[in-house]
């Protein structure tokens, strides 16, 4: 099953990092967050990706063109011009890099990938968020209900610390608790090819008209996820993910441990 990753936006809310690189190339633990997202799927045996490019597409292309030289040790013989890449291990990814336009909205980017996906079920996510998600469980849930679309429903983390009181005495403080207010779009989808018919020809946001149409038609199901989920929208989010990585505990990896 192919996995679509929308990686073409401007990342304006993370402008401190995205002046020179696209948001999916912002590094966590020395590797782009795009790499971390792909590893989530690869851990469950899904290794073919269709990446929708836009803003600074050439930087993403360069990363994958030089993937092994950037992620492994090298020997460069300047007398002969020979370069030897010392592989730690082969990465079994097939990556389709497709320019979907600079100003295209998310549904428009997906629509432009239709010929790359074909008439097959596929997965889709964004290039700026990670989750401690069981991909096998997500797919099994999708197969169980027979609808056209499944979205991972998550509880967003609060931006502010949460105080627990006994009278005026603060008895507990949580820095970034998970809100109990409700579920939101967690950005991990399993989709049938018929969803393209819900996009139409207009260039719109996937999160607006297409998802609204799917919901109105009774074709959108949500898998409630109570575990770790974290977008990388701001510099604070980026620092949080970096701190989790440096602690040696990365909740978005299969076993919660950082990988080399």
Image: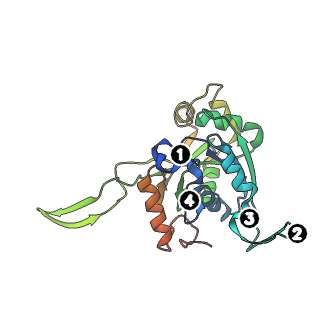
Q: How many marks?
A: 4
The answer to whether marks 2 and 4 mark residues whose Cβ atoms lie closer than 8 Å is no
Residue beneath label 3, please? Answer: 69
Among the two numbered marks 2 and 1 on one chain, the one whose residue lies closer to the N terminus: 1
Q: In this image, 231 relative to 127: left or right?
A: left
Instruction: List the single residue furthest toward the front.
Output: 79
**Is 57 or 167 nearer to us in this picture?**
57
Residue beneath label 2, please? Answer: 80
Q: How many residues crowd around disc 2 within 10 Å: few (fewer than 14), some, or many (20 or more)? A: few
Instruction: Give the spatial CA distance, label 1 vs label 3.
Output: 25 Å
The label shown at residue 241 is: none
The answer to whether marks 1 and 4 mark residues whose Cβ atoms lie closer than 8 Å is no
Instruction: Give the spatial CA distance, label 2 vs label 4.
Output: 34 Å
Mark 3 or 2: the one toward you: 2
Q: How many residues crowd around disc 1 within 10 Å: few (fewer than 14), some, or many (20 or more)? A: few
The answer to whether marks 1 and 3 mark residues whose Cβ atoms lie closer than 8 Å is no
Residue beneath label 4, please? Answer: 27
Q: Which SS class for mark 3?
A: helix
Q: Residue at x 37, y 57 (%)?
A: 178
Q: Residue at x 50, y 74 (%)?
A: 248
Q: Residue at x 63, y 43 (%)?
A: 56
Mark 1 or 4: the one toward you: 1
Among the two numbered marks 3 and 2 on one chain, the one whose residue lies closer to the N terminus: 3
Q: Which SS class for mark 2?
A: loop
């Amino acid at each position: 099953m192919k996995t679509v990753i929308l990686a073409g936006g401007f990342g304006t809310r993370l402008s401190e990092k995205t002046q020179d690189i696209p948001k999916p190339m912002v590094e966590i633990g020395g590797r782009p967050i795009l790499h971390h997202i792909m590893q989530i799927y690869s851990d469950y045996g899904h290794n073919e990706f269709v990446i929708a490019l836009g803003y600074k597409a050439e930087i993403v292309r360069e990363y994958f063109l030089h993937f092994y030289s950037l992620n492994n040790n090298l020997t460069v013989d300047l007398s002969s011009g020979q370069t030897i890449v010392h592989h730690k291990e082969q990465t079994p990814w097939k990556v389709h890099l497709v320019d979907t336009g600079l100003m295209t909205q998310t549904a428009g980017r997906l629509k432009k990938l239709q010929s790359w996906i074909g008439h097959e079920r596929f997965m889709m996510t964004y290039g700026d968020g990670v989750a401690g998600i069981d991909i096998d469980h997500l797919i099994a849930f999708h197969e169980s209900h027979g609808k056209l679309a499944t979205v991972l429903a998550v509880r967003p983390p609060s931006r502010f610390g949460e105080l627990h009181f006994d009278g005026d005495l603060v008895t507990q403080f949580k820095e970034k608790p998970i809100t109990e207010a409700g579920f939101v779009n967690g950005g991990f989808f399993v989709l049938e090819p018929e969803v393209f018919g819900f996009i139409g020809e207009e260039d719109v946001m996937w999160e607006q008209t297409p998802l609204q149409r799917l919901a109105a038609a009774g074709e959108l199901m949500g898998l409630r996820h109570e575990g770790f989920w974290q977008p990388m929208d701001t510099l604070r989010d980026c620092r949080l993910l970096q701190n989790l990585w440096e602690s040696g505990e990365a909740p978005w990896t299969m076993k919660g441990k950082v990988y080399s």
